[in-house]
Amino acid sequence: MYTPGDLKRGLIIEVDGAPCAIESVTVSTPTARAGNTITRVRMRNLRTKHKLDKSYRGNETFAVPDIEKKPVQFLYSDAQACHFMDEASYEQFGLDLDALEWERNFLVDGIEGVRALFWNSTALALELPNNVVLAIKETSPAVKGNSATGRTKPATLETGFTLQVPEHIDPGVKINVDTRTGDFQGRAKD
């Protein structure tokens, strides 16, 4: 059982009989006497893909859904879905593009550490590794001497995702990207 103090981004809880992934948590403490801490949670129902906004008091509890995490390999994507293969059973399955709104920004051939979340033997969502290595497809060229400043510029990755990188980074460079926030983490080691 989870309490509102345990809630954080990425945690999966059971709400109204369905597994929900938490996207953001905001905690507020009223200044009035005997005021309970209120935790506001934005989550996504993994079955229906609808977003939910709920508020909870400090004494409520949440059930842990029966989610099974299996290592999978990304195969390809088409107009309707991204396709994966279970690394243990070699069974292939697809997840709708709507279910992978954020995760699609980081899916490339050869990505390692991806796990699918199964609930009642049905694949519902993906769990990505915290960091992935992606190549910069397009950005303005670096100018000598720009590494001394903290300024950034937009860069488009090989997946089409756009993020801010330091000015001294060139197109074609491989970088580490945080999949939780979409932030630049540094150059990738060769």
Image (spheres, rainbow, N blue to C red):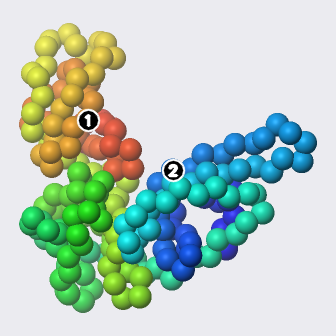
Position of 34 relative to 14 (above/below): above
- Between the C-alphas of marks 2 and 1, the distance is 20 Å
Disc 1 target residue: 163
State the residue at coordinates (38%, 72%): 48
Look at label 2 and name its amino acid: Ser
The kind of secondary structure element at disc 2 is: strand
Name which quarter of the figure residue 145 lies in.
Answer: top left
State the residue at coordinates (30%, 65%): 99
In the shown orientation, is residue 131 left or right of residue 94? right
Q: Position of residue 72 (x, y in %)?
A: 26, 74
Residue sitting at the far right: 33
State the residue at coordinates (9%, 21%): 141
> Where does the N terminus fall, quadrant-wise?
bottom right
Q: Position of residue 77 (x, y in %)?
A: 12, 66
Evaluate whether residue 8 shows in this view.
Answer: no
Which of these two is toward me, 73 or 34? 34
Residue 14, labelled with which disc? none
